[in-house]
Image: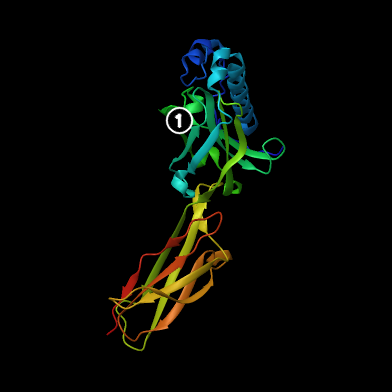
Amino acid sequence: MSQHSRSKLTSGKKLVLGVSALAASGLAVGLLVTPSAMAEGTGAAEALEQSKAAAAQASAAKTDAPKPLAARTADSTVVSAITVNGGNSASVGTTNTQTITVKWTLSGGSTLYGSHAALWRGTDRDGGLKQFINSEQFDADIDPCVRSGDATFSCTATFKIDPRDDLKNEDAGAWKTSLYAITDAATDVRTDNAKTWYLKRWSRLSNNAAPEPVAKGKTITITGKLERANWDTYKYAGYTQQTVRLQERSLTGSYATTSSHSTGTGSQAGVEKKTRTATTDRCYRYKFEGTSTTPPVTGTGDCVDVR
């Protein structure tokens, strides 16, 4: 399996269950760790195995639970209201750590033996895995779910992604959310793709209209540059051959697109340049609509005084 080098994504913990008394109480059951069970672990494959082991242990706890619980067993565990980053794509620059929050709701079971979400990228978890990141709650052995009703739980998991430790340019694009939920209901939930979301390389777009002021009838040049974060070099680089729209307005009007063109390549990577004839005072800006790997961005308008 092809993987590029990563810093440690998880704590590498080997989990041990201590659940009998808690299961009998009908409360959510956490995964407990003993000091002797600590082990180092790195990479997506090991993070995935840790998640699988935790789910298996939760399932074993359910099997070993006192049989009187069966009288309260519902038909199935239901996962609903799943959101990643509030329903928005996540954008990461070159230095700052991005916190991504996953929320979900569980219903159908009065006892929760375990539920966790993970973020991953690849074609298949077992055969085409590129990234797999367990949550902060998972690594800290904290249950992400709290009871919110007689047979419902509200769950929140957070993930901190550092571009310098966790990301390469190839990681931009579609990611999936893996999730399991094991309750005393007859059927559990184990899904590799509870939600698809997008991790994007932060973008920025400059623009400048010159000269200022300008004589009526002279040429105005509107220059801009579209850049995005490079997770291989930790710098910003021009985003080439991307459609950028030039927008204009009067001093009191609203912006409207007047032309579109493709950003430059080579030494002019990401650069866009258009000219206009000066007639009246006017404001100019560039706008980029975004792609599956890069968020949309709009430049700050620059107004020109025509004399």
| Residue labelled with disc 1 | 153
Quadrant that contains the N terminus? top right
**Residue 7 on image: x %, y %:** 56, 33
Number of numbered callouts drawn: 1
Whether residue 92 is visible to the viewer of this picture, yes or no, is: no
300 is higher (above) or lower (below) than 32: below
The residue most toward the front is 71
Which type of secondary structure does the marked residue at label 1 adopt?
A: strand
Looking at this rendering, what residue extends furthest in the bottom direction? 217
> 184 or 212: which is nearer to us?
184
- Which part of the image, by quadrant, shows the C terminus? bottom left
* Residue 163 spot, x, y in % from top left: 50, 42
Give the left or right position of residue 149, taking residue 244 as reference.
left
Residue nearest the observer in this picture, 247 or 229: 247
Regarding residue 204, the answer to whether it shows in the image is yes
Q: Position of residue 255 (x, y in %)?
A: 37, 73
Compared to residue 304, the image places residue 163 above or below, namely above
> Does 88 sit left or right of 303 as displayed?
right
**Amino acid on which the number 1 mark rests in the picture:** Phe
Residue 124: x and y in percent read 69, 40
Towards the viewer: 189 or 123: 189
Q: How is the image coloured?
A: rainbow
Residue under the image location 48 percent in, 37 percent down: 104
Neighbours of disc 1 within 10 Å: few (<14), some (14-19), many (20+): many
Quarter holding residue 96:
top left
Residue drawn at (51%, 39%) of the image = 80
